[in-house]
Amino acid sequence: MATGAYTSRAIAYLKADVPKDAPGPRIAISGPNAPVLRDLGNGLLVAYVVDTGEQFEIVQERHLDEENCSEDELHAAGLSNLACQAEGSLQVATHPCGEMFAVLMGGNFEASLILLEDVWQHRFRQFVSGDYVVAIPARDLLAFCDASSIAGLRELSAVREKARTTGADHPISDRLFRRMGSSWQVFDAYSRGGRVK
């Protein structure tokens, strides 16, 4: 576990990876001011933020050096602090169709909850019996359903589309993701404009 005063306060925070072929300039920061990022291998990254009371600051490589903290220790602290955030504020709302569920948790870390194993193995299991599929179009948007639910998948696609057309703040992904074992994989059948028939 991270032991430094700064890194021990870090919270795991989900971000989108910028594809190499994305239009526009790509800014790469290296050296001590580079953000600490963990690649999930599915177009998503984990960053780590510290709440200063006024804003979130991104943990940078120099913070690890200053506090003699490894990336694995930072990640463990980030997940633990995210779980603490969820403990006091996580709520699940059932959509009127009864097949999709929306997660509410204060507006900053909803999408980041895909990083917490216990949430998916235990806490949300009462809602879904099979594989999970999630929509995480923005940092404050997380909705899920059972992968076998056509109605649920239709609602997830609607959530994703609404976020895209309204210009959601802090966007993450216009794809859907399916939980396979303990990882999340792009759910191709309904991603990038796919429609549920």
Image (cartoon, helix red, strand yellow):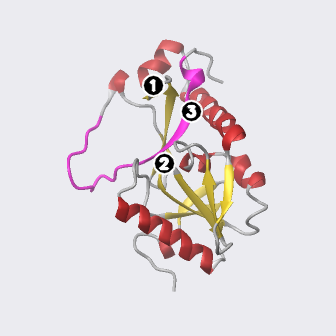
Tag nearer the camera, 3 or 2: 2
**Closer to the camera in the image, 186 or 127:** 127
Examine the rendering and report whether any part of residue 90 can be seen.
Answer: yes
- Could you give the CA–CA distance between mark 3 and mark 2, rounded to whole angstroms? 13 Å
Examine the rendering and report whether any part of residue 188 can be seen.
Answer: no
Q: Which mark is residue 54?
A: 1
Q: Residues within 10 Å of mark 1 (few under 14, many from 20)?
A: few
Q: What range is drawn magenta here?
A: 6-28
Q: Percent position (x, y) of residue 170? A: 40, 47
Q: Which residue is mark 3?
A: 11
Q: Which residue is mark 2?
A: 139
Question: Which residue is painted at 62% across and 54% down in the image?
Answer: 103
Lower position in the chain sequence, tag 1 or tag 2: 1
Question: Which residue is painted at 50% across and 33% down in the image?
Answer: 48
Check disc 1 and report its element: helix, strand or loop.
Answer: loop
Q: Is residue 194 left or right of residue 70?
A: left
Q: Percent position (x, y) of residue 11? A: 56, 33
Q: Is residue 23 magenta?
A: yes
Check disc 3 and report its element: helix, strand or loop.
Answer: strand
Q: Percent position (x, y) of residue 44? A: 47, 50
Work out whether 37 lies above or below 19: above
Total marks placed: 3
Question: Which residue is painted at 54% across and 76% down in the image?
Answer: 154
